[in-house]
């Protein structure tokens, strides 16, 4: 009788461990948000222009690092991306107030950073390779720029 109870306990414990093991190894593991991934002028490591970068570059996503700000900048004809420039974030509209952050645009037109930046409430200004500047008149609610300015509508641009 005692042996039968031990066998039942062993089977029960084995079952529970099997279920826990399956759950542990099948769950998507969060990516390390401590990974540094910052775009640089002239860099070419980026991809997926016009897509919402934070779909993958977030905790639990497949991208390397968790972006705080990211997006894509096109030329004024909206036919191709710019190859350099910068995105600045100010405390007031139209490039006024205090400059808080600057992010470089890479050779594929993308800008992105994992740096600790809180851009909510700030106003972005984009400067293209020829010096043309475009400012956003409303403040940001997040750094997911391509969530609104995507490949098919309302593209960010500067020449």
Image (tube, grey):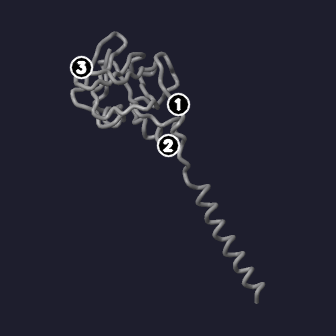
Quadrant where the C terminus sits is top left
Marks 1 and 2, Cα distance to the nearest angstrom?
15 Å
Q: Residue at x 38, y 27 (%)?
A: 72
Question: Where residue 132 sits: x, y (%)?
Answer: 29, 13
Residue position for label 2: 61
Judging depth in this view, the residue of 97 and 71 nearest the camera is 97
Judging from the image, what secondary structure is the residue with disc 2 in?
loop
Quadrant housing residue 85: top left
In the picture, the disc for residue 36 is 1
Quadrant where the N terminus sits is bottom right
Quadrant housing residue 156: top left
Judging from the image, what secondary structure is the residue with disc 3 in?
strand
Question: Where residue 137 sits: x, y (%)?
Answer: 21, 27
Compare marks 1 and 2 and give the one earlier in the sequence: 1
The answer to whether residue 75 is left or right of residue 111 is left
Q: Is residue 17 above or below residue 114?
A: below
Judging depth in this view, the residue of 50 and 137 nearest the camera is 137
Judging depth in this view, the residue of 148 and 116 nearest the camera is 116
Residue position for label 3: 96
Marks 3 and 2, Cα distance to the nearest angstrom?
35 Å
Circles 1 and 2: CB atoms closer than 8 Å: no
Residue found at the very far bottom of the displayed protein:
1
Quadrant housing residue 108: top left
Compare marks 3 and 2 and give the one earlier in the sequence: 2
Number of residues whose C-alpha sits closer than 10 Å to that of mark 2, classed few (under 14), some (14–19) or many (20 or more)? some
Of labels 3 and 2, the one closer to you: 3
Number of residues whose C-alpha sits closer than 10 Å to that of mark 1, classed few (under 14), some (14–19) or many (20 or more)? few
């Amino acid at each position: 009788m005692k042996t039968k109870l031990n066998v039942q306990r062993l089977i029960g414990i084995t079952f529970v461990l099997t279920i826990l093991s399956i759950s542990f190894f099948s769950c998507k593991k969060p990516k390390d948000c401590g990974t540094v991934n910052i775009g640089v002028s002239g860099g070419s490591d980026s991809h997926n222009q016009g897509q919402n970068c934070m779909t993958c570059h977030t905790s639990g996503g497949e991208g390397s690092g968790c972006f705080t700000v990211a997006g894509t900048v096109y030329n004024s004809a909206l036919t191709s991306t710019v190859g350099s420039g910068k995105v600045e974030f100010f405390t007031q509209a139209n490039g006024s107030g205090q400059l808080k952050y600057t992010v470089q645009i890479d050779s594929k037109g993308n800008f992105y950073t994992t740096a600790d930046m809180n851009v909510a409430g700030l106003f972005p200004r984009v400067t293209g390779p020829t010096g043309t500047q475009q400012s956003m008149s409303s403040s940001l609610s997040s750094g997911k720029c391509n969530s609104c300015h995507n490949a098919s509508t309302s593209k960010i641009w500067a020449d």
